[in-house]
Image (spheres, rainbow, N blue to C red):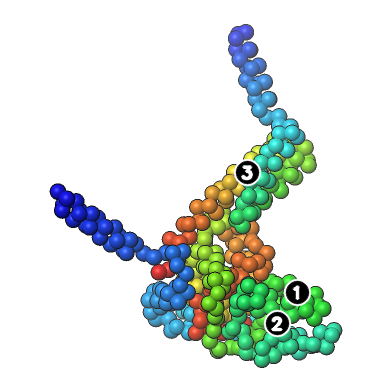
Amino acid sequence: MRAWMCLAMTLFLAGASQAASTEADFKTALAAAEAAEQEAGALKNQWIPTEQALAAAKKAAAAGDFDAAVAQAKEAEALAKASIAQAKEQQTAWKAGVIR
Amino acid sequence: MKTFRAIASVVVTIAALAIAGARPATAADSIDPDADFKAFRDYFTKRFPNVPLNDFVNGPYSMDAELRKQWQAIDDFPPYDFAIDRGKQMFATPFKNGKTYGDCFPDNGVGIRQNYPYFDLQSGEVITLELALNRCRETNGEEPYSYVKDEMASLTAYMAFTSRGKPFDIKIPNDPRALAAYQKGEEYFYTRRGQLNFSCASCHVQNPGNHIRTEVLAPALGIVAAMPIYRSEWNSMGTMSRRLVTCNSQVRGVPLKPQDELYRDVEYYLSYMSNGLPVSGPGARP
């Protein structure tokens, strides 16, 4: 019984520590997302969903919901990185579609 | 043995040259607008052998008989008429300094739409009609208009109307900067972008005549000829800038600023591909 109680407590604490994002976590995640989006901008290939995720992250942070804010910022970073990969791949791939 | 090696070397060299020769030339290997033009035109005319060449300027109506009937009915009272009237009035109204738009253009701005965009050797950039109109305003001490609709759409509607039927005559001067602008436009046209991973060509080269939701996709050949257009979807007039911005948004890409250098380059490329086709603007689209 004691062992079960211990395990339950451990799992609870582990869950609690994962869920509780802080403002500092958000700032770190936002900085990474914005850096990636800036790079996508330099390639003239930003995506609308990235901008929406960034806006949602800031809105959640302003409301004090840092879990949601971090999740949205990470989503924005992933989208921005996908748009960068697309732009870099298309730097040569566009030629395949040209009518010849 | 020595002879065998020599023969083998020659065979390998010939094979390598044959492979290199067989490889299709890519656009980036050399910039050849004339070859591009011919290939572009051949592609559309062979794919749609029943569409008369000049009818490509009618976009989706050249692809779909039912849609064409609706358009012909609508065209009894064209929804862009008010824009032509407004543009004509604006065109004739002097600026505060007494000059008019006509003073900024050859032939007083009448019947010249088919020559835009052009590559300006002095500034080294593509000048679209929209850009030229706003530069005219600024030169004469007036505030520039929005590039996407309203006044700009009215002015370009009037200028297109005075040029109806005139064949596009876009020139690429023998200048590396002009060729570079042309190629950047071509690259933009074929580059996939946005979360949906579409290029302009995905719709207007690979799928003209097919539907995206309820819309019939227009062929890229002659796609600039009807600009500006009244779109029922917009419930208003829109310029070439508006069309490009909307296309980017529809594939979930953040649009560039209207009249961004790349937008002007792609308009230059597409207009060159339309050479010889008649100006049909202003147009009406679903």
Query: Mark 3 and mark 1, same subunit?
Result: no
Give how far across and how far down residue A37 sits, in percent.
Answer: 65, 49
- Specify the amino acid type for callout 1: Tyr
Q: Quadrant of residue B154?
A: bottom right
Give the CA distance from mark 3 to mark 1. Answer: 36 Å
Residue A49 higher or lower than A10, as above or below: below
Residue B204: which numbered mark, if any?
none
Residue linked to disc 2: B155
Is B118 in front, or is A1? B118
| Callout 2: SS | helix
The answer for which chain carries disc 2 is B
Residue A13 higher or lower than A49, as above or below: above
| Callout 1: SS | loop
Residue linked to disc 3: A77
Give the CA distance from mark 3 to mark 2. Answer: 42 Å
- Specify the amino acid type for callout 3: Glu
Number of numbered discs overlaid on the protein picture: 3
Tell me if residue B248 can be seen: yes
Give how far across and how far down residue B100 sits, in percent.
Answer: 77, 87
Q: Quadrant of residue A57?
A: top right
Query: CB of mark 3 within 8 Å of CB of mark 2?
Result: no
- Specify the amino acid type for callout 2: Leu
Residue B102 higher or lower than B59, as above or below: below
Give how far across and how far down residue B243 sits, in percent.
Answer: 61, 70
Q: Residue at x 63, y 77 (%)?
A: B120
Residue linked to disc 1: B145
Query: CB of mark 2 within 8 Å of CB of mark 1?
Result: yes
The answer for which chain carries disc 3 is A
- Answer with mark 2 or mark 1, whichever residue precedes in sequence: 1
